[in-house]
Image (tube, rainbow, N blue to C red):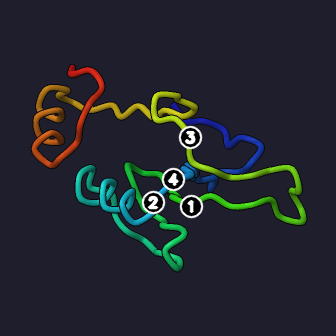
Amino acid sequence: MSQQPGPLGADVAVTHILVVADPVRSRDFWVDVLGAELYREYGGTSVVLKFAGTWLLLVSGGNPTADKPAVTFRPPADPDQVSHAMTLRVADCRAAYAALTARGATFLPPP
């Protein structure tokens, strides 16, 4: 079944932006544990990754800018408070769990 392009056109791409406390540490997790591909880094404050057919931008926090004077980008203050989640669909959940655990990932609940 062919889909008609939406209002953004046929070449739209999704980029997830995650504000993180440590872009280098986060980069290492996404690349070394999850297998993302490093595309580009910018001065230790942002990292661009290719992951599972999408783009992922890891950025450090930042103060408001002239065009957004009331908006502050900051990582979560409390690791027990969730404001963003991504779900990764895999063919074999238990095999993925074992492979990721072996690479250093920790899970809140096991599968």
Give the amino acid type for the residue marked by disc 2 in the picture. Asp
Badge 2 or badge 3: first in the primary sequence? 2
Cα–Cα span, label 2 and label 4: 6 Å
Question: Which mark, residue 20?
Answer: 4
- Look at the numbered discs 1 and 4 and tell me whether their residues touch, using CB distance below 8 Å: yes
* Label 1: how many Cα within 10 Å (few below 14, some 14–19, many 20+): some
Question: Which mark, residue 22?
Answer: 2
Q: Residue at x 77, y 43 (%)?
A: 7
- Residue 38 rendering spot, x and y as whole percentages: 37, 68
For label 2, the SS is loop
Cα–Cα span, label 4 and label 3: 10 Å
Give the vertical position of 28 relative to 44 (above or below): above
Cα–Cα span, label 2 and label 3: 13 Å
The residue under label 1 is 60
For label 3, the SS is loop
* Label 4: how many Cα within 10 Å (few below 14, some 14–19, many 20+): many
The residue positioned farthest toward the front in the image shown: 78
Cα–Cα span, label 1 and label 4: 5 Å
Relative horizontal placement of residue 79, taking residue 37 as reference (left or right): right
Cα–Cα span, label 1 and label 3: 13 Å
* Label 2: how many Cα within 10 Å (few below 14, some 14–19, many 20+): some
Q: Residue at x 63, y 50 (%)?
A: 74
Badge 1 or badge 3: first in the primary sequence? 1
- Residue 90 rendering spot, x and y as whole percentages: 26, 32
The residue under label 3 is 77
Badge 2 or badge 1: first in the primary sequence? 2
- Look at the numbered discs 1 and 3 and tell me whether their residues touch, using CB distance below 8 Å: no
Cα–Cα span, label 2 and label 1: 7 Å
- Look at the numbered discs 2 and 4 and tell me whether their residues touch, using CB distance below 8 Å: yes
* Label 3: how many Cα within 10 Å (few below 14, some 14–19, many 20+): few
Q: Residue at x 41, y 31 (%)?
A: 87
